[in-house]
């Protein structure tokens, strides 16, 4: 049987080989475009933290299991530790620093404070990036949905019930 | 102005944490920062025969590779002592890379330093180590026959055996006897932020940014190991991404970071990988516990024997003390608690959330549950009958909320209507059961004098400082509350600063003692400053308060006034202005009562659970958890509730969901620690 393969090539996709030494890359993060020099092996997470000094995105496991590094690429949740920085060229990266449009806190940030949905705070940026996306995805309908679709974000302080309360509040306020 | 202590105040560091502005140790920006990477031993026991460094040294960006062959020797060997004591607190009586010996898998055998994180990690992968392997022990089963009873535990602070009466005689006169035995896998803390240290030298002075629960412990330990004056070591930590005991002691990587920074003459950041977190900062030891209870028909206990057998390192007689609480909660004339150890090729284990009690109380309360069933007595009623009026020395409890907690939690849970017969309630394929347990945790008094400093400026804003550290407990929030009330200022006029050894000293934040001991020092500093300014006003002929009795002066919103005549008074700023003072300052301290204080020192609580079990698949789901606790004066119900909730979820997850095991490596292969944590749909506990 013939397998139909469709490949979409965007204008942004660079095809020339780069690396292993540092290569220039244009990354759009929180609406601003940065020209950085990174080796192709460098993750989006380390690029944000070590090259752009955007340390709100946290490194918990560096292997895709804890969710602390959750950011959005083109509005979709991704794990920055499993994403190569160079693969984000031509895409919009949003981090916790870019969540709020303007001076005030995003409603989810306010709800996390109000419900004490964190203790040490290390998982919190990832939790919040997931929580906001969860509602946009339509995956926050029930407590079971919230638990399931937030299950990629570990909170070792075990603030889970408070995290769900914060998400419910924002969901209901924006419904 | 009403007091803020006791109010549900939002965390003062909340905005920094939800916006990503909070900087943790691995996020400190320093000029010329270099990156360290540890190479851990891939055998559990033996010697390094040869280390091949050529490829690592030739890799791009590599600044140095340290091994036992070129690392400077430490000045003094470490001696384990719990950080609560306030002295140097190495996590194990061992420092790696001093010779070729390998005592446990993951033990550092080399440290690579490079100019980027990726280059350090890659170069570390190029270090080739050849070993001569010797026989190893990594589980109790492999060396059960070698078990021994140490004289003391816990860095010598606790006896390994505690006993009174005659347990055999007590069991002989019992109408009923219950024996339980449990095995527990090891556990790792796995704080979401792995332990990290950034070390920077300025001449002979060292600054360490360290993810620690005890900055002072880090300072003293590193100074001790490097033979430095303590005053030349400063430790800073503003946010710690979780601790759970794994950051309560100072582990070897901290000092290795300092040594590496000195070697390359640049600041070095060393952040453990998640894999290394299983072999670098201790763990809760693999253990077995047995308990025998003897009782009369009315439930009166005649004997309680509680034994623990656990695995420890080659260097230390360490076990979380499991029997200290279990031998106190219930009245019993014949009691025996004994810890026995097996030495193995693991690093020294350490505190893990609810150290000792988490496992020990599980065993006691499970045995009590079995006893209640055997006696046909309601489990709550049995606890009430057996609970001791005093501690085993006959001292009254400093406070005793057990009966009240049992009542409150039972009521809110709906305990009275339950059918106690096993396997009688079903929900579809699930069997539904309910159960309860008493909770108890010691009030620890090992710590030295705690100190704090309060300073107020003439404009009415204040800074209160102490060397504690925030890792999620809410200490910065509740200390701001305590200081605001004591100074008579609104909370937003008070900034609480911590996390720096240049500030007045407090002990490590361990043993659930922080709220009590730090708040006492903070209160005394702030109240001392208030009293100083009130004294200045009543002695000042130009003050409306001149000649007043200081005891009759109260302060609200920064204004001192007479209690009886609110219109008579002035602000702090007014009296300071007349005295040409831009600021005023006071130190406060608090010294804990002696360990032989004539009180029983336990904090009590009660927990109730509804659990669903699928009898065919073995699935367990906790549907409801309800707890009531009597922790003393609650400074902030919001942060206290979160702490208790976290404890309940850890306590439940402990037997149900979490385990670390060590794989038996194939010959020549790499031993690996593996861990499992399931995160089921968690219920909402009511506390």
Image (cartoon, coloured by chain):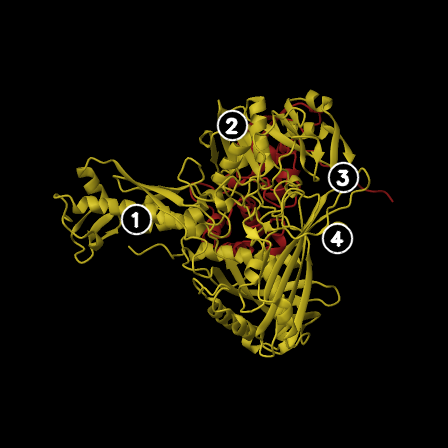
Q: Specify the quadrant of the image occupied by residue B566.
A: bottom left
* Position above or below: B63 against A86: above
Quadrant where the N terminus of chain B is found in the figure: bottom left
Percent across and percent down for residue B585 are: 29, 40
Chain under label 3? B
Chain letter for yellow, please.
B
Left/right placement of residue B382 relative to residue B576 reads right
Percent across and percent down for residue B628 are: 49, 65
Q: What residue is shown at x 40% (from left), y 45% (from top)? A: B450
Q: Secondary structure at mark 2?
A: strand
Give the mark nearest the N terminus, 3 or 1: 1
The answer for how far apart the CA atoms under marks 4 and 1 are is 59 Å
The answer to whether the residue labelled 4 contacts the one labelled 2, judged by CB atoms less than 8 Å apart, is no
User: Is B302 in front, or is B280?
Assistant: B302
What residue did someone put label 3 on?
Answer: B670
What residue did someone put label 2 on?
Answer: B200
What residue did someone put label 1 on?
Answer: B527
The answer for how far apart the CA atoms under marks 3 and 1 are is 58 Å
Chain under label 4? B
Q: What residue is shown at x 47% (from left), y 41% (from top)? A: A101
Give a yes or no on whether discs 4 and 2 share a subunit. Answer: yes
User: Is A145 in front, or is B673?
Assistant: B673
Q: Secondary structure at mark 3?
A: loop
* Chain A visual colour: red
* Position above or below: B375 against B646: below
Q: What residue is shown at x 73% (from left), y 68% (from top)? A: B615
Left/right placement of residue A48 relative to residue B397 reads right
Q: Which mark is residue B145?
A: 4
Chain under label 1? B
Give the mark nearest the N terminus, 3 or 4: 4
């Amino acid at each position: 049987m013939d397998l139909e393969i469709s490949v979409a090539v965007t204008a942004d996709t660079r095809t020339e080989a780069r690396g292993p030494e540092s290569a220039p890359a244009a990354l759009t993060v929180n609406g601003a475009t940065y020209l950085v020099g990174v080796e192709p092996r460098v993750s989006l997470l380390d690029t944000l933290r070590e090259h752009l000094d955007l340390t709100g995105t946290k490194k918990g496991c560096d292997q895709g299991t804890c969710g602390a590094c959750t950011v959005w690429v083109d509005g979709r949740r991704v794990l920055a530790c499993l994403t190569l920085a160079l693969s984000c060229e031509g895409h919009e990266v949003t981090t916790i620093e870019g969540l709020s449009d303007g001076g005030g806190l995003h409603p989810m940030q306010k709800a996390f404070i109000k419900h004490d949905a964190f203790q040490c705070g290390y998982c919190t940026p990832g939790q919040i990036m997931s929580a906001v996306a969860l509602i946009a995805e339509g995956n926050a309908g029930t407590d079971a949905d919230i638990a399931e679709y937030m299950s990629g974000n570990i909170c070792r302080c075990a603030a889970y019930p408070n995290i769900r309360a914060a998400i419910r509040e924002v969901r209901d306020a924006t419904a | 102005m009403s007091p803020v202590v006791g109010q549900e105040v939002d965390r003062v560091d909340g905005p920094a944490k939800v916006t990503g502005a909070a900087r943790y140790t691995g996020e400190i920006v320093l000029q010329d920062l270099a990156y360290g990477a540890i190479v851990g031993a891939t055998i559990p026991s033996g010697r390094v025969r040869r280390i091949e460094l050529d490829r690592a040294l030739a890799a791009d960006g590599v600044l140095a590779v340290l091994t036992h062959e070129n690392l400077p020797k430490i000045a003094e060997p470490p001696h384990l002592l719990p950080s609560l004591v306030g002295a140097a607190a190495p996590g194990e009586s061992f420092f790696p890379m001093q010779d070729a010996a390998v005592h446990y898998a993951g033990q550092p055998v080399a440290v690579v330093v490079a100019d980027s994180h990726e280059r350090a990690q890659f170069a570390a992968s190029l270090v080739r180590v050849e070993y001569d392997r010797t026989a190893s022990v990594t589980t109790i089963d492999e060396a059960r026959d070698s078990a021994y009873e140490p004289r003391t535990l816990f860095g010598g602070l606790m006896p390994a055996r505690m006993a009174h009466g005659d347990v055999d005689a007590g069991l002989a006169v019992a109408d009923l006897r219950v024996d339980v035995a449990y095995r527990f896998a090891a556990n790792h803390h796995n704080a979401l932020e792995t332990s990290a240290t950034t070390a920077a030298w300025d001449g002979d002075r060292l600054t360490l940014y360290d993810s620690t629960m005890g900055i002072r412990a880090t300072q003293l330990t590193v100074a001790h190991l490097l033979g430095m004056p303590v005053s030349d070591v400063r430790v800073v930590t503003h946010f710690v991404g979780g601790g759970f005991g794994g950051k309560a002691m100072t582990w070897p990587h901290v000092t290795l970071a300092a040594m590496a920074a000195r070697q390359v003459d640049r600041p070095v950041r060393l952040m453990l990988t998640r894999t290394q977190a299983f072999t670098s900062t201790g763990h809760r030891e693999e253990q077995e516990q047995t308990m025998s209870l003897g009782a009369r028909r009315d439930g009166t206990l005649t004997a309680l024997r509680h034994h623990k057998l656990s695995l420890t390192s080659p260097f230390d007689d360490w076990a979380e003390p499991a029997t200290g609480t279990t031998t106190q909660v219930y009245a019993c004339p014949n009691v025996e608690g004994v810890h026995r150890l097996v030495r193995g090729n693991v690093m020294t284990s350490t505190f893990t959330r609810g150290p000792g009690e988490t496992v020990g109380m599980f065993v006691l309360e499970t045995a009590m549950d079995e006893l209640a069933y055997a006696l046909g007595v309601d489990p709550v009623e049995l606890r009430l009958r057996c609970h001791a009026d005093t501690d085993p020395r006959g001292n009254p409890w400093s406070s005793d909320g057990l009966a009240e907690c049992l009542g409150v939690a039972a009521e809110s849970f709906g305990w009275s209507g339950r059918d106690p017969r096993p396997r009688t309630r079903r929900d579809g394929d699930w069997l539904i059961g309910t159960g309860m347990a008493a909770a108890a945790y010691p009030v620890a008094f090992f710590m030295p004098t705690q100190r704090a400093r309060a300073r107020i400026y003439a404009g009415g804003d204040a800074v209160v400082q102490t060397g504690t550290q925030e890792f999620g407990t809410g200490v910065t929030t509740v200390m701001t509350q305590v200081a605001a009330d004591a100074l008579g200022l609104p909370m937003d006029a008070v900034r609480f600063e911590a996390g720096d050894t240049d500030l007045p000293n407090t002990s490590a934040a361990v043993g659930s003692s922080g709220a009590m001991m730090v708040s006492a020092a903070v209160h005394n500093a702030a109240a001392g400053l208030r009293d100083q300014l009130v004294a200045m006003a009543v002695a000042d002929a130009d003050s409306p308060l001149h000649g007043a009795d200081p005891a009759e002066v109260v302060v609200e919103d920064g204004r001192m006034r007479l209690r009886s005549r609110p219109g008579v008074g002035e602000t702090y700023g007014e009296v300071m202005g007349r005295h040409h003072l831009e600021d005023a300052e006071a130190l406060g301290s608090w010294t804990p009562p002696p360990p032989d204080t004539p009180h029983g020192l336990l904090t009590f609580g009660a927990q109730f659970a509804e659990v669903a079990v699928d009898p065919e698949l073995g699935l367990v789901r906790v549907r409801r958890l309800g707890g009531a606790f009597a922790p003393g004066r609650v400074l902030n119900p919001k942060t206290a509730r979160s702490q208790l909730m976290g404890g309940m979820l850890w306590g439940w997850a402990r037997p149900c969901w979490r385990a670390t095991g060590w794989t038996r490596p194939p010959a020549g292969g790499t031993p690996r620690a593996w861990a499992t944590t399931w995160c089921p749909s968690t219920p909402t506990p009511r506390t």
